[in-house]
Image (spheres, rainbow, N blue to C red):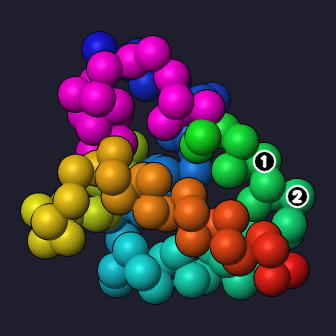
């Protein structure tokens, strides 16, 4: 089990962007991509990539993502939370290339 700390950059990213008050994760992500600086996006990609590649089990990662991104209903997207996070990370990487 992954200990959730509010100071964790992955938790801050997921909880800050994909919280319960969002309309949809797509809209929340687009808003983030529009206001976050290139440096902030680069820092987030590093933190997310480190988390994705960490030694925690996929089950623990999935549970952590579900708890932190409580505004995303993963069954509706038919992907695991970890797969979803990988897709989000790729979208941020692609956005950085356009900045």
Whole-percent x and y of residue 44?
69, 50
Task: Work out whether residue 80 or residue 13 is closer to the camera in this orientation and state it.
Answer: 80
| Image point (34%, 31%), residue name | 61
Q: Is residue 10 left or right of residue 67?
A: right
Q: Position of residue 83 (x, y in %)?
A: 33, 52
Q: Secondary structure at mark 2?
A: helix
Which quarter of the figure is the N terminus placed in? top left
- Give the Cα distance between marks 2 and 1: 6 Å
- Residue at 34% over, 80% down: 24
Q: Where does the magenta region start and end?
A: 50-66
Relative horizontal placement of residue 43, taking residue 80 as reference (left or right):
right
Q: Is residue 6 visible?
A: no
Provide residue 33's location: percent of width, then percent of height. 67, 77
Q: Determine which quarter of the picture holds residue 50.
A: top right
Whether residue 85 is visible: yes
Q: How busy is the neighbourhood of tag 2: few (under 14 within 10 Å), some, or many (20 plus)?
A: few
Q: Specify whether residue 89 is painted magenta.
A: no
Which residue is nearer to you in this view: 44 or 58? 58
Quarter of the rendering containing residue 57? top left
What residue do we see at 27% from left, 37% from top?
62
Give yes or no for contact between labels 2 and 1 (Cβ–Cβ under 8 Å).
yes
- Read off the residue under disc 1: 43
> Residue tagged by mark 2?
39
Image position of 3 with respect to 27: above or below: above
């Amino acid at each position: 089990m992954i200990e959730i700390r509010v100071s964790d950059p992955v938790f801050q990213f997921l909880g800050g962007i994909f919280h319960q008050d969002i309309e949809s994760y797509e809209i929340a992500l687009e808003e983030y991509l529009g206001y976050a600086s290139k440096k902030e996006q680069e820092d987030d990609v590093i933190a997310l990539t480190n988390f994705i590649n960490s030694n925690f089990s996929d089950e623990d990662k999935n549970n952590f993502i579900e708890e932190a991104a409580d505004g995303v209903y993963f069954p509706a997207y038919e992907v695991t939370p970890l797969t979803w996070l990988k897709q989000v990370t790729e979208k941020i990487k692609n956005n950085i290339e356009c900045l």
